[in-house]
Image: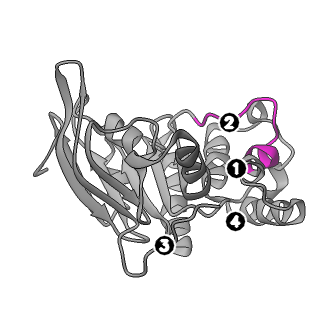
Amino acid sequence: MLAVPPVPNSPTLLVANIIKSYGARRVLDDVSFSVAPGERVALTGPSGSGKTTLLNCLGGVDRPDTGEISLLGARIERLSADGLNLLRRERVGTVFQFFHLLPTLTAAENIELPLQLISTPTVERRERVAAILERVGLASRAHALPAQLSGGEQQRVAIARALVHRPALLLADEPTGNLDSANGENILRLLRELTDETGTALVLVTHSEDAAGICHRGIHLRDGRIVPA
């Protein structure tokens, strides 16, 4: 388990003065903000504004050149590769536009995978998977493969997988971008309800006004900097 405990009354996520460049191009330029426990923040901006790079830095997929990113007091940019992998497994959940479910695993097995990675006991794994399948309305589809599920069902499985290990931070990258309006609305309602229930902080990258509408506030990027929307 991670050695750094949560700090009471502190932000779940703290981002301070991060800069990220690729060659001569500065993609993130002095970006700073914080996210409180249970807060939902929409990350918006035109294509090429730095949203995906920022999300990758928040999730530890990429590292900033300078600046600070703290998740529950753990400095992401200072962690070793092993420490970063552990933090991501235990404290971060991610939902993607194109689901990224493993095609040879059932819905239940896809959801169970994060619990296996952190060595959750078998009985507890099964209980958590069953409970969250029920919560997202897919208990009857537990043994279905992704190819047997609709797009909306696949995204509900992806959300369940992202939350089953009870992360502090949920990162969502255009989670309704591959869905029709009805399924998109259902996914947004589910994200709002589940983050309210769990107190999980959410950073949501989106071009959708409806998706931004479930968030408490927005952060707008342009040319790598935070600007008024």
Q: Amino acid type of disc 4?
A: Arg
- Mark 4 and mark 1: Cα distance apart in space: 18 Å
Q: Residue furthest bottom?
A: 8
Q: Earlier in the sequence, mark 3 or mark 1?
A: 3
Q: Compare residues 191 and 30 and report the one nearer the observer.
A: 30
Residue labelled with disc 2: 101
- Within 10 Å of disc 3 (Cα), the crowding (few <14, some 14-19, many 20+) is some
Residue 44 pos. (x, y %) = 26, 45
Amino acid type for the residue under numbered disc 2: Leu
- Badge 1 is on which residue? 114
Alpha carbons under labels 3 and 1: distance apart: 20 Å
Identity, as a three-letter code, of the amino acid under mark 1: Pro
Report, in whole angstroms, how far the alpha carbon at label 3 lies from the one at label 2. Answer: 30 Å
Which dot, 3 or 1, sits closer to the camera?
3
Nearer the camera: disc 4 or disc 1: 1
Q: Main secondary structure of the magenta part?
A: loop
Horizontally, is 25 left or right of 183 in the view? Answer: left
What residue is shown with label 3?
6
Circle 3: residue type: Pro
Mark 3 lies on a secondary structure that is loop
Q: Secondary structure at mark 1?
A: helix
Kindly indicate whether the residue at mark 4 contacts the one at mark 3 (C-beta within 8 angstroms). no
Q: First in sequence: mark 2 or mark 1?
A: 2
Mark 3 / mark 4, whichever is N-terminal? 3
Residue found 68% across the figure and 48% down from its top? 157
Question: Is residue 3 part of the magenta span, yes or no?
Answer: no
Is residue 109 part of the magenta span, yes or no?
Answer: yes
Q: CA distance from mark 2 to mark 1?
A: 12 Å
Circle 4 SS class = helix
Q: Which mark is residue 135?
A: 4
